[in-house]
Image (cartoon, rainbow, N blue to C red):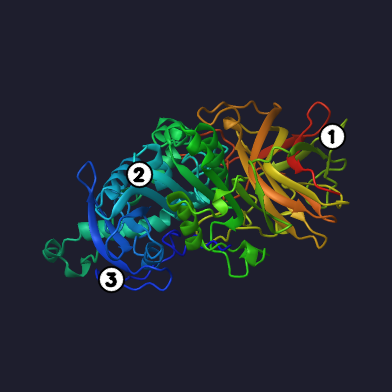
Amino acid sequence: MNIRFFQRSLFVFFLLAPWMLSAQPSPSASGTLPVQVEANVRVKMRDGISLLCDIYRPTGPGRYPVLLTRTPYNRKDASQGMFLASHGYVVIQQDTRGRFGSEGEFYPFRHEAADGYDTIEWAAALPYADGRVGTFGGSYVGATQMLAASAAPPHLVAIFPYVTAAEYYEGWTYEGGALMQWFAESWTAGLINDTLGKKSARLSRPLAWAEQLPVDEFRIAAFPAPDELAPYFRDWVRHESDDDYWAAVRVSDHYGKMNIQALHAGGWHDIFSGGSVRNFIEMQKQAPTEKARRGQRLLMGPWAHAATSPEGRIGGVTFGTQAVLDMNDTIVRWYDYVMKGRQNEFASDAPVRIFVLGENAWRTEREFPPARAVPTRYYLHATRGANSASGDGALSTAPPKQERADEFEYDPASPVRTLGGRLCCGGLDPGPFDQRPNESRSDVLVFSTPPLEQDLEVTGFVTMELYAATSAADTDFTAMLVDVDPSGFARYLADGILRARYRESRSKATPIEPGKIYAYSIDLWATSNLFKAGHRIRAYVSSSNFPRFSRNLNTGESTFGSSRMVRARQTVYHDAAHPSALILPVIPRPK
């Protein structure tokens, strides 16, 4: 199975070449049906704004189900449209509001529910459509699907959102109260390219410039201010709590009216992996009909938010060709099952398919997380101190007794640097990279099991329960899980962060008292990994993972407008009264 997340109008830095679309019928080598194309079709939204799309459909008479994708990354991917249409679908590829050929102003998430609803209902009424609409696409294109589904358009039958979030506060812009800084900034930078071109052209006034003197001050373009290009970025930073700004685009408030089947696909190393899993679980519980609840599917591979190589390499690890997903084929097979009743793998009564890392094999499950998983506490221990890999930090299922606490200094001016993991987009590679370069830092606490005597599988949600204090008015605590092989390679599996003032609620900050011990529950999201015999389970505890997450400056001030830094003295407790532990969902396996 191969995943090409960003080959098809998904990755913001992947520039698609212009494609000349013909209105004449074109033969297709990939399917059984010849295809014709209608380019530059305008669809009017309820407020009068027109969105541009291209339509690919089988040549000749007949009505077919519609497959719709709504993208901010340029609709012109003719190869995908031709492929899907040749398999008996009307394929509509649309630029979202304010992007490329579409009118209006782009502001992430704000218009996607209404625009998605209007486009779906328009598509269902086309003379060559059979009245049923499905959607597909990943990342933000997954968000356009989830938000459209939240509006419950009557003719939407199914969706296929992959590598996308469940919410646009938690898990897209913030995690644990900390800004997902690298993604927020790099994604915004990619989006600005098209916006800059639009606004510069709009502000260009050559005749007016000709009147200006001196002549040498002629401006080629009138570049807008940053707030004109991406006003949403400052809004994201300003709204650092899960407040009414985010509630306006909250998907989870609407699961109960999403009467649709859905294939939720994600990657264990993907920046939105938590959302893929949550959407599946909650729609299984809350969808309004039995058919919709039973119609949810989950596909979780080893993927990151980037392309997978042909040999199955992701980040610093090669998982094999079995890790490669053919995305076009998956779209066809999903909708052949939903729209045409084909009895393929999606007809199974095991709705979950997961890739078990370490074992590097696929497996089906009847639910996620697996009901047979046993939450197992691996307590933090240290005698001399767990600072860096040279310390004696240990993980054990034996509860701690009397042990001294570990201490380290967190300096926001010298944060622990991100090495792979759940990243997007551009410049820093995502995926499972070796974490050893950070193990020598004194501000990274390292806790490990002895080499395992037998294989141990972890599949489900991972949590770090930490008892800690800080000298600062506010701070962060981070946790990471890695698999250490006999050579010492520390393979990234999962990570998480918690901003102290958001320990109780993401919607309201609650100050902490310097020096006071608090319990922090750090969510590392979900994974599936086989720790092989001879490997070690290892956990890191620190206070930064930068630039994946914004640095906590330790002042207690809001992120917006703050630049003053102070150092913090962090104390992590692991004794009988404060049993800090890594909680792993262990799957019983035959010995």
Mark 1 crowd level (few <14, some 14–19, many ≥20, 10 Å Cα): some
Q: Position of residue 128 (x, y in %)?
A: 27, 55
In terms of sequence position, does the residue under pointer 1 or pointer 2 come before the other? 2
For the residue pair 345 and 193, the one nearer the viewer reads as: 345
Q: How many marks?
A: 3
Dividing the picture into quarters, in which one does residue 258 lie? top left
Number of the front mark, 2 or 3: 3
Mark 1–mark 2 Cα distance, whole angstroms, equals: 53 Å
Q: Position of residue 42 (x, y in %)?
A: 22, 55
Q: Is residue 388 left or right of residue 273?
A: right
Dividing the picture into quarters, in which one does residue 368 lie? top right
Q: Which residue is mark 2?
A: 112
Q: Which residue is mark 3?
A: 25
Q: Which residue is mark 1?
A: 404
Q: Position of residue 350 (x, y in %)?
A: 62, 46
Question: Residue at the location (35% across, 44% down)?
Answer: 112
- Up/down of 279 relative to 538, above or below: above
In terms of sequence position, does the residue under pointer 1 or pointer 3 come before the other? 3
Q: Secondary structure at mark 2?
A: helix
Q: Is residue 7 left or right of residue 36?
A: right
At label 3, the amino acid type is Pro
Mark 2 crowd level (few <14, some 14–19, many ≥20, 10 Å Cα): many
Q: Secondary structure at mark 1?
A: loop
In terms of sequence position, does the residue under pointer 2 or pointer 3 come before the other? 3
Q: Position of residue 508 (x, y in %)?
A: 51, 27
